[in-house]
Amino acid sequence: MNICLYGASSEKTAQTYIDAVEELGRKIGERGHGLVFGGGANGLMGAAARGVLETGGAIIGVVPHFLDRDGVLFQDCTEMICTDTMRERKQIMEDRADGFVMTPGGIGTFEEFFEIFTLKQLGRHAKPIAVYNLCGYYDALKALLDKAVSENFLKKQSMDLFRLCGTAGEVLDYLEQSGGEKCEAPSFT
């Protein structure tokens, strides 16, 4: 299974997050899975890649040309794919992945998650999506989505399209158990 990871690229990320996502990367490799990610060397992206590398797992980095500069990219990818645009990057990451995990991050991470979540809701893919809720980072996201459900902006069933997970083991167990699930296009009536 190739697992697409979305996460922070910031060098200022707290060590607690770095350590936990590096451990997730190690577990990805130990379980025989590959990593698909944005190709970054820093933050949680870099942490995941270092963990996978440590266990000899495959690492596919996907990066737009404008980010190809010294110190930005993880140099030990098994395969590095350069794209012209961010949109092309996301499409390749989606196509190469069998499942997705969102680790803590900022606006880019949120955007990637919401796009893949929306596509699943629309029946465009049936791949599992895990949200790694380290240190309660995504508690507020869960509250926002629950509010959207309670106010009838989001169907309750949409909350079943992803799983909030508290540990690396839980993330991987969910992705492994959910691979190949059926996804029906929603009814808009």
Image (spheres, grey):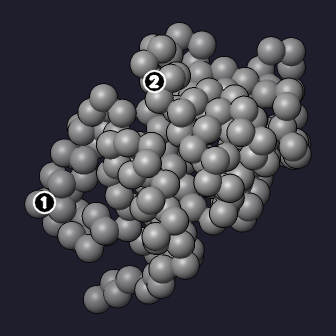
Q: Name the secondary structure under disc 1.
A: loop
Position in image of residue 126 (x %, y %): 52, 75
Q: Which residue is drawn at 61% across and 38% down?
A: 26
Q: Residues within 10 Å of mark 2 (few under 14, many from 20)?
A: some
Position in image of residue 57 (x %, y %): 75, 46
Q: Residue 64 carries which label?
A: none
- Real-space Cα separation, disc 1 to disc 2, in angstroms: 33 Å
Task: Locate residue 111 relative to residue 45 in the image: left or right.
Answer: left
Label 1 vs 2, first from the N-terminus = 2
Locate residue 2: give its quadrant.
Answer: bottom right
Residue 105 visible in the current orientation: no
Position in image of residue 46 (x %, y %): 67, 27
Assign the N terminus to one quadrant of the image.
Answer: bottom right
From the viewer's perspective, is residue 11 above or below residue 149? above
Between residues 126 and 21, which one lies in front from this camera angle?
21
Position in image of residue 24 (x %, y %): 53, 39
Is there a contact, CB below 8 Å, between mark 1 and mark 2? no
Q: How crowded is mark 1: few (under 14 residues within 10 Å), some or many (20 or more)?
A: few
Assign the C terminus to one quadrant of the image.
Answer: bottom left
From the viewer's perspective, is residue 71 above or below residue 101? above
Q: Name the secondary structure under disc 2.
A: helix
Task: Locate residue 128 relative to residue 163 in the image: left or right.
Answer: right
Q: Which of marks 1 and 2 is in front?
A: 2
- Which residue does the numbered mark 1 point to in the structure image? 151
From the viewer's perspective, is residue 118 above or below residue 171? below
Between residues 124 and 31, which one lies in front from this camera angle?
31
Q: Residue at x 78, y 41 (%)?
A: 56
Q: Which amino acid does label 1 sit on?
A: Glu
- Which residue does the numbered mark 2 point to in the structure image? 17
Q: Which amino acid does label 2 sit on?
A: Tyr
Between residues 181 and 90, which one lies in front from this camera angle?
181
Farthest-out residue, top: 12
